[in-house]
Amino acid sequence: MPTKKIGLIGIGTVGRAFLKEFKRNKSFVKKELNLDLEIVKVCDINPKLKNFSQELGFSFTTKPGEIINDPQIDILIELIGGINPAKKFIISALKKGKDIITANKALLSSGGREIFQLAHRLKRTIKFEASVASAIPLIKSISEVLKFARIKSIYAILNGTTNFILTEMQKYRVNLFEALEKAKKKGIAERNSSLDIKGIDSLHKISILCFLCFGKFPKLEEVLTEGIERISLQDINYAEELGFRIKLLAIAKKVKKEIEVRVHPALVPQNHPLAETNGVYNSIFINTEVGSNFLFSGLGAGGKPTALAVFTDLLSLVREGSNFLIPERNSKINFRKREQLYSRYYLKFLAKDKPGVLAKISKILADLGISIASVTQKETATLKSKFVPIVMLTHKAKEKDLNKAKEKIDRLPIIKPPTQLIRIEEL
């Protein structure tokens, strides 16, 4: 039984959980799966982690080069996160003949094109199940099964923190700030949770799924990306009255001969499985050309689920050997520009309670070919505020026309800008 030798860089939350999982399962893996695995060395820039590592029986270093340049190490597990120096370490390790396991969504979404091309040329394997919805075997399912079913679209809730916040707002009628503070107290949200709240975390993940499903990474700076920071409790309540729930969706889909990728809050019909995904759970709804729909659901990432996904990748790599991933197989396919988006919309205006307001708003929309499906105005002005909310749902329209209308309406003296715009996904 040959021994596969491993080096790990990064002993943060996931790294610590992985080392514990490895130690707990090593004898079982050897006995039941006939695999002999050995972690030769672990690395972190924090020297205080030496005691933790040595208590578990692992040799410790603060110098990544001791792992990257060690010829006896077959596999590098990178768990430091971020783009640099992780990219440098992975590229160096590939050139030294090592296979890679990573959970680094930020790196893969921005530098995956270069890394996968290099791995392919060097006939090395990169495993990355832990980079997206780590508690769900999503990457494996798409890579091995679903791509043969010709995927048409992915609609996904990929961030457990924002889904928890929106669920709390809907369930307990609290505002976003109160829900975020609760998430922080429970350890669900980081102290600085801007990557979650602004949709960046979901952007990184849908970029990776886009590559898997459609063969090409989008340019992150060109992807329509909006977070939940402007979602109010009033929006949550109106959406529910209209038969929807608000979710932060990450979307990748074929539209004719192009790919459309976007991340933003959306109104989802209450009876759809994505609307029923609550708390820290993730859900991924996939539609295929063969007419079948697939739903994957599970807990959002955390230390232990991510560590388990890394461990599963390790077992898969050792059992299957190097089965390198083909880089960007659809390099000629184009991405749809955000101005071309064609959708229904939820619009919330804050308007002075005067006659003729609706007529002025409606005329601007009509002049740009935007048809109104419904109008809701329940509240009246108070001494505290001279403005009342007016909620409109539109029929399908071009986003560029909606943006033009929104700019014109926000310039009206009877309107308090900015108008709230949320897309409706009928799925």
Image (cartoon, helix red, strand yellow):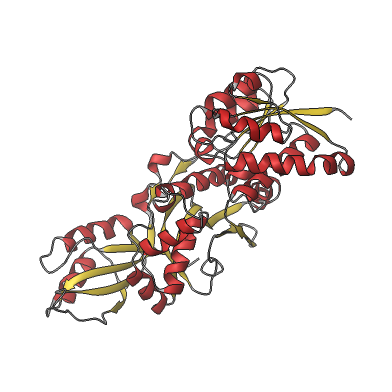
Q: In which quarter of the image is residue 293?
A: bottom right
Farthest left residue? 413
In front: 97, or 22?
22
Image point 50% across, 40% down: which residue?
333
Q: Describe residue 2's horizontal placement relative to residue 330 as left or right.
A: right
Vertical relation: 142 (above or below) 426: above
Image point 63% across, 40% down: which residue?
16
Q: Where's residue 424, x and y in %? A: 41, 66
Vertical relation: 339 (above or below) 246: above
Q: In which quarter of the image is residue 215?
A: top right
Image point 44% across, 73% down: which residue?
172
Q: Describe residue 48's horizontal placement relative to residue 404 as left or right.
A: right
Q: How many labels does the image show?
A: 0
Q: Where's residue 249, x and y in %? A: 47, 58
Q: Describe residue 359's horizontal placement relative to residue 401 as left or right.
A: left
Image point 67% across, 41% down: which residue?
18
In front: 421, or 201?
201
Q: Describe residue 368's horizontal placement relative to residue 425 as left or right.
A: left
In front: 12, or 208?
12
In front: 111, or 302?
302
**Residue 157 appears in the picture as rendered:** yes
Q: Where's residue 80, x and y in %? A: 55, 34
**Residue 394 appears in the picture as rendered:** no
Quarter the N terminus occupies: top right
